[in-house]
Image: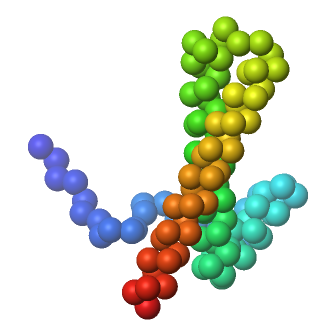
Amino acid sequence: MASQPTSSVGTTSRKRKATEDLSQNPHTLKARKRIEALAKDPVRGQVEKAKAADQSAITVAKRKVVHSAEYLSASPAKQEEMVQNSAAAVKLKRYFLSISVLIFILIWL
């Protein structure tokens, strides 16, 4: 049995590319600049993560509605209403949850 080389947590075996070797695609440059800006401003990074989590929750809720038997048997107008209602319900739930978290934080400060 060959022994595996040990590595410390957080290290990788691959070296990073030099700056001049990175892609010069305009979309890649824009994304790299955005990620660097988020790394410099942790509050903005947290806001972006929260927005992404909210959007993900909305997408999951919509997907559940679209795959339900009630949705499949409904008229197109009713289907659209069902999707909109599910998105609104998730938004409200997450909004009130975030308010309660903020109140909790403020009480304990």
The quarter of the image holding the N terminus is top left
Q: Residue at x 77, y 12 (%)?
A: 75
State left or right for residue 35 relative to residue 25.
Answer: left
Where is 35 relative to 72, above or below?
A: below
Where is 24 relative to 43, above or below?
A: above
Q: Residue at x 80, y 16 (%)?
A: 76
Q: Residue at x 64, y 36 (%)?
A: 86
Res 19 quadrant in image: bottom right
Residue 20 position in % (x across, y down): 76, 69
Res 104 quadrant in image: bottom left
Out of 30 and 77, give the one closest to the viewer. Answer: 77
Q: Residue furthest left?
A: 1
Q: Residue at x 32, y 68 (%)?
A: 9
Out of 28 and 99, give the one closest to the viewer. Answer: 99
Tell me how the rendering is colored.
Answer: rainbow
Out of 60 and 30, give the one closest to the viewer. Answer: 60
State left or right for residue 97 relative to residue 49.
Answer: left
Where is 57 relative to 61, above or below?
A: below
State left or right for residue 12 relative to residue 66.
Answer: left
Tell me if residue 26 can be seen. yes
Tell me if residue 53 can be seen. no
Res 49 quadrant in image: bottom right
Residue 24 position in % (x across, y down): 83, 60
The quarter of the image holding the C terminus is bottom left
Out of 49 and 8, give the one closest to the viewer. Answer: 49
